[in-house]
Image: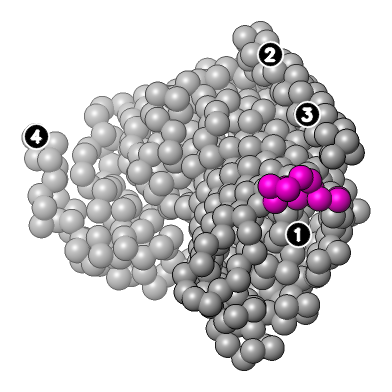
């Protein structure tokens, strides 16, 4: 399983992550345009693999999470597919949002040791996603905490529930 | 003439019956949604199963994968695009009437361009047919487009659906008794919770989403646009060019309205001139396991060149019944009356057989 994943993303990930330099976000919360990976953005024109990698790479250093939270950033293709996103902390509802446009970012209250679960419901077929987590006080990572794709065209497979392995 | 008017009465009676069932269905839907119980019965789950272009369904009658149901489509080899189809990958069909027969092959070519099976907009089908009686072969391309996709719904509507889904899932989680929540979980407790969550999303959440999406889609139509050209092997010449547009408006409970327009430029057999044919079809169909349909069609024909002896304009109508022999094979019988202005003709009967494959069967129901 993990072998297959790393095989499919290895080529693009190397290309997408190398030119990115992590800079501290400014006090305004805006990211320096020069820090955005140009190859990654161009890669966004590619279906699936490229878009997910590029959006993840370009977006991960845009905003730092505030104290005592974890920022969960979901990127997916096809960007036109809406996603119902729901996160739980220790089995308790934390946030529920409708994701549109291929990228969504939310911050939830989090203390180390707590268990975070995610439920994603894609309103469409042929999807693929990656989820990144950024805990306050830690350096952001380009390694997704979870990734997956539509196992088939069957409508019943459009919901995925998983444990979010917070780094 | 007496026989003809009796048929008209029968047809009218069928239509009235169909409309009364339709209004009863509309009331039923209203009461179901106002009750506010998000968990559906098995029957409701079946009723609100996904019915969109991109979500493959497993029954040929639901996909619209049948031989052409329209009057005079047989032997008219370019009229391949009677309606939008839903998730059809491949189809082979044959149809025959007293006036001739036709064979057709069609396949989805979108999959070739889109190896990721990413179909946010629609499907593209390539279709070929042959009519042995007129010795005409045609090749056509058809684009199916659905406006019944979640991506086209507003943020507000999507948020409402999401909240209702969450409510249903929470109700299910409460009854699933997953143990302490909101307190630091052990790994085993977390595993059990995630299992319950997946179960509740599938059994309580999915039916609510499917139902609410159907309600939100309302009467949004599906469209199909096609072009086709035909070659005549008898004369060895280009015979026809046709453009066809069709629209299907799904109503409730398996009822749908189908409108179809066709413009063709064809060579007239006798005399060798060219003529324009403009035709249109309107049909109401009802899909249970068996598909019942009532359709009416007009044809206007005008000459472009001299000499030209085109057939006159006419009106045709009649019922059709399509029976799914297996989930992929459909046998259809249709009866057609023709009115050329000088009274109704005797009934023409037609038989059609089609076999098709969907993109992938839905495991949902």
* Nearest to N terminus: mark 2 or mark 3: 3
Label 3 secondary element: helix
In the picture of the structure, the residue carrying the numbered disc 1 is B67
Confirm whether circles 2 and 3 share one chain.
yes
Image point (51%, 67%), residue name: B303
Relative image position of residue A109 (x, y in whole percent) = 37, 24
Rendering quarter of residue B127: bottom right
Viewed as shown, does residue A3 lie left or right of B232? left
Relative image position of residue A164 (x, y in whole percent) = 49, 40
Labelled disc at residue B194: none
Q: Is residue B342 magenta?
A: yes
Dot 3: within a 10 Å radius of its alpha carbon, few (fewer than 14), some, or many (20 or more) residues? few
Mark 2 and mark 1 residues within 8 Å of each other at the beta carbon? no
**Mark closer to the observer (2, 1):** 1
In the picture of the structure, the residue carrying the numbered disc 2 is B27
Image point (26%, 34%), residue name: A65
Label 1 secondary element: loop
**What whole-number distance in Å separates the C-alpha atoms at marks 1 and 3?**
25 Å
Confirm whether circles 4 and 2 share one chain.
no
Give the residues in magenta. Answer: B336-347
Mark 1 and mark 3 residues within 8 Å of each other at the beta carbon? no
Rendering quarter of residue B89: bottom right
In the picture of the structure, the residue carrying the numbered disc 4 is A28
Vertical side of B341 occupied by B102: above or below: below
Vertical side of B63 occupied by B253: above or below: above
Rendered image coloring scheme: one colour
The N terminus of chain B lies in quadrant:
top right
In the picture of the structure, the residue carrying the numbered disc 3 is B12
Relative image position of residue B6 (x, y in whole percent) = 87, 33
């Amino acid at each position: 399983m993990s072998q297959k994943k790393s095989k499919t993303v290895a080529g693009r990930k190397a290309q997408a992550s190398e030119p990115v330099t992590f800079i501290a976000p400014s006090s305004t919360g805006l990211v320096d345009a020069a820090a955005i990976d140009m190859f990654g953005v161009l890669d966004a024109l590619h279906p699936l693999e490229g878009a997910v990698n590029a959006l993840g790479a370009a977006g991960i250093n845009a905003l730092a999470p505030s104290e005592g939270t974890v920022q969960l950033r979901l990127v997916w293709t096809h960007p036109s597919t809406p996603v119902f996103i729901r996160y739980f902390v220790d089995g308790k509802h934390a946030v529920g949002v409708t994701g549109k446009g291929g990228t969504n970012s939310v911050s939830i209250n989090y203390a180390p040791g707590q268990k975070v679960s995610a439920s994603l419901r894609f309103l469409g077929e042929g999807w693929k996603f990656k989820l990144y987590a950024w805990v306050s006080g830690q350096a952001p990572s380009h390694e997704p905490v979870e990734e997956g794709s539509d196992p088939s065209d069957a409508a019943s497979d459009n919901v995925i529930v998983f444990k979010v392995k917070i780094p | 003439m007496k026989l003809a008017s009796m048929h008209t009465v029968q047809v009218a009676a069928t239509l009235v019956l169909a409309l009364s069932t339709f209004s009863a269905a509309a009331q039923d839907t209203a009461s179901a949604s106002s009750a506010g119980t998000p968990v559906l019965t098995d029957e409701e789950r079946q009723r609100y199963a996904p019915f969109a272009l991109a979500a493959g369904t497993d029954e040929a009658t639901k996909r619209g994968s049948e031989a052409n149901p329209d009057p005079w489509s047989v032997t008219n080899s370019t009229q391949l695009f009677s309606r939008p189809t839903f998730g059809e990958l491949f189809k082979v069909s044959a149809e025959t009437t007293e006036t001739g027969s036709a064979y057709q092959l069609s396949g989805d070519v979108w999959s070739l361009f889109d190896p990721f099976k990413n179909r946010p907009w629609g499907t593209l089908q390539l279709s070929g047919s042959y009519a042995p009686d007129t010795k005409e072969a045609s090749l056509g391309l058809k684009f199916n487009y659905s406006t019944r996709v979640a991506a086209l719904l507003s943020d507000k509507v999507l948020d409402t659906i999401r909240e209702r889904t969450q409510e249903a899932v929470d109700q299910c989680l409460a009854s699933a008794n997953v143990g302490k929540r909101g307190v630091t979980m052990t790994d085993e407790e977390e595993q059990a919770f995630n299992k319950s969550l997946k179960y509740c999303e599938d059994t309580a959440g999915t039916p609510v989403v499917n139902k609410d999406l159907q309600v939100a889609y309302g009467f949004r139509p599906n469209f199909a646009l096609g072009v086709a050209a035909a070659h005549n092997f008898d004369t060895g010449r280009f015979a026809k060019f046709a453009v066809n547009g069709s629209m299907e408006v799904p109503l409730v409970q398996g009822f749908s309205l189908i409108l179809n327009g066709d413009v063709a430029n064809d060579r007239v057999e006798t005399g060798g001139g060219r003529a324009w044919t403009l035709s249109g079809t309107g049909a109401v169909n009802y899909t249970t396991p068996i598909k019942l349909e009532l359709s009416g069609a007009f044809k206007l024909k005008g000459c472009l060149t001299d000499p030209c002896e085109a057939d006159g304009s006419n009106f045709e109508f009649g019922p059709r019944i399509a029976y799914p022999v297996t989930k992929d094979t459909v046998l259809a019988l249709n009866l057609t009356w023709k009115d050329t202005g000088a009274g109704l003709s005797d009934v023409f009967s037609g038989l059609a057989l089609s076999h098709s494959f969907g993109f992938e069967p839905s495991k949902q129901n």
